[in-house]
Amino acid sequence: MAHPAPAPVDVVVIGEALADLLPQGAVLGGAPFNVARNLAALGRRPLMITRIGPDELGAAIARQFDHFGLDPVGLQRDATLPTGTVQVTLQDGQPRFRIPPDQAWDALDPALTARLVAHARPAIVYYGTLAQRSARSREAIRTALATTPALRFFDVNLRDTSVTTPTNEMLALEALRGAHVVKVNEDELTQLVDWFVRPALPDAVAGLIRRFALRRLIVTRGAEGYAAYDAAGERIASGPGITATVVDTVGAGDAFSSVVLLGELLAWPLAETLARANAFAAAVCTLPGAVTDDRDFYAQWCRRWGLLPHANRG
């Protein structure tokens, strides 16, 4: 079956689109889908590549593609597997996840995914860990990355995958080997160091960067702020947290990543990019869920940063 080529894009985002089953009800999410929607609302042209099932949640995700102006060419449809869901509970405002196996995003088509990425010619490819838990989707991401010289942005997002093989350690090892820029939170950094920097070095961050020849490592620290490290392991930017009236923190890391990608595309200075990412992530924490349909929310950031929101782009 022939598939249309995607329109010109800035960033390819590959991975899960799903429904977060929150205490207040179902909210569409998944880290890659959150990033793609944020980027689109902030005026960029991401290509989101994911897979949905033949159900109402899949139809709801398709409607979100339309609402945010995402190219439907990236929306693969599975005839049997259900659209993904994640059970999310909040403990002291922090999300905890339970993720069932055998969902549509576990079955990304490797050939189609690679073809879409090759045709898109993006500046950046964004991917995470969770979508790689299945062999088929892992192959799709690996094959797609091999088709492009684009910057590879690995947003670690370790989750309990509810599968025992491959382990998160194995998934992270393979993903790190192919990455250029990596974003982690403090807990993920501790886990990666435990897995891959042995024996523990006095400067574990530098050890991790050197082992995987990373160009940059970005660490988010919640209320404590953030830091970025260069290829030599030197801290090159940092900043404090921002006080906000927190509704929940679901999607805060995805919001941060979205603006880091935006800054990379627009060649903002790194310190400015990270400060803007931190402010945007703090604002998202004041909202229920990870992404809002309220275009005014995004319009205020576009005005602040001198951007055109997606509705005004040609």
Image (cartoon, rainbow, N blue to C red):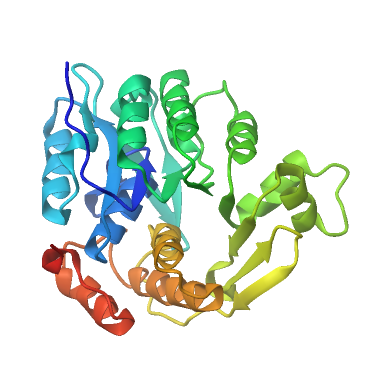
Q: From the image, which quarter does the C terminus lie in?
A: bottom left
Residue drawn at the location 36% of the way across and 43% of the way down: 121
Work out whether 275 lies above or below 96. Answer: below
Q: From the image, which quarter does the N terminus lie in?
A: top left
- Judge by depth and name the residue closer to the eye, 310 or 195: 310
Locate residue 137: give its quadrant.
top left
Point out residue 170 in the picture as x, y percentages from the top left corner: 63, 29
User: Total of numbered circles in the picture?
Assistant: 0
Point out residue 58 in the picture as x, y percentages from the top left corner: 17, 34
Q: Is residue 14 visible?
A: yes
Point out residue 216 in the picture as x, y percentages from the top left corner: 63, 58
Work out whether 272 lies above or below 231. Answer: below
Q: Is residue 289 visible?
A: no
- Judge by depth and name the residue closer to the eye, 303 or 32: 303
Residue drawn at the location 18% of the way across and 17% of the way down: 79
Q: Locate residue 153 relative to residue 78 in the image: left or right.
A: right
Point out residue 184 in the picture as x, y percentages from the top left corner: 58, 54
Residue drawn at the location 57% of the way across and 53% of the way down: 181
Q: Locate residue 202 relative to residue 138 in the image: left or right.
A: right
Q: Locate residue 205 relative to residue 9 in the image: left or right.
A: right
- Judge by depth and name the residue closer to the eye, 167 or 127: 127
Work out whether 108 lies above or below 182. Answer: above
Residue drawn at the location 45% of the way across and 37% of the way down: 148
- Judge by depth and name the residue closer to the eye, 289 or 254: 254
Work out whether 312 lies above or below 70. Answer: below
